[in-house]
Image: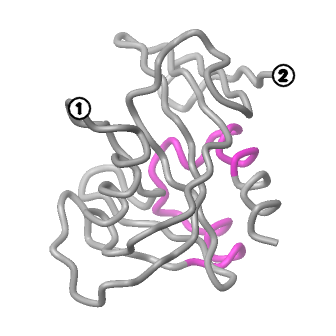
Amino acid sequence: MSTIYTDLLGAHVELTFGENRLGMEARHVLVVLKHEGKWLLTRHNLRGIEFPGGKAEEGESLEEAAIRETIEETGVTITNLIRFAEYVVNSDEPFCKAVYTAKVASIDGHPQLFETLGALWMTDEELSNCDELSFHMKDEGMKEIRKRVMQFAK
């Protein structure tokens, strides 16, 4: 079953829970995890607060990209990745993003960061009331993704 909605930039988005169900190969990743009661987020220099993620590099698997992007953006090393969703954004250049959850393996207190200001840890209440979220953190699909991650966090 898919959820179809329009994001805040006007693009039509299709979200499904599972893998390879939307007919487009994922080359982007998003890592949504909860650790010790808090969500792992980062502050992107341009977009605002969001979950870590990005694009897989040439020759890199999606799992490798998820691990690398999380380290680069937050200083957190993850393990036990579970791919549980994907979504296609039908913008000028459509793309598919694989969504993962994971466990925290280690946290670097002084990471070398790329494109972000590092890890932010937020409770459910803090995340729900945050006014600095990036645009895609505010759409209907992200609410559904967070609900699914809560099932893994138990």
- Tell me if residue 75 comes above or below residue 36 in the rendering: above
Prevailing SS of the magenta stretch: helix
Residue 1: which disc?
2
Range of magenta residues: 122-145
- Give whichever of 147, 43 is nearer the camera: 147
- Tell me if residue 78 comes above or below residue 52 in the rendering: below
- Tell me if residue 144 comes above or below residue 26 in the rendering: below
What residue is disc 1 on? Answer: 59
Quadrant for the N terminus, please: top right
Q: As shown in the figure, which amino acid type bears the numbered disc 2?
A: Met
- Tell me if residue 134 comes above or below residue 122 in the rendering: above
Left or right: 95 with respect to 12? left
Quadrant for the C terminus, please: bottom right
Sequence-first tag of 2 and 1: 2
Q: Residues within 10 Å of mark 2 (few under 14, many from 20)?
A: few
Residue at point 51% right, 21% down? 89
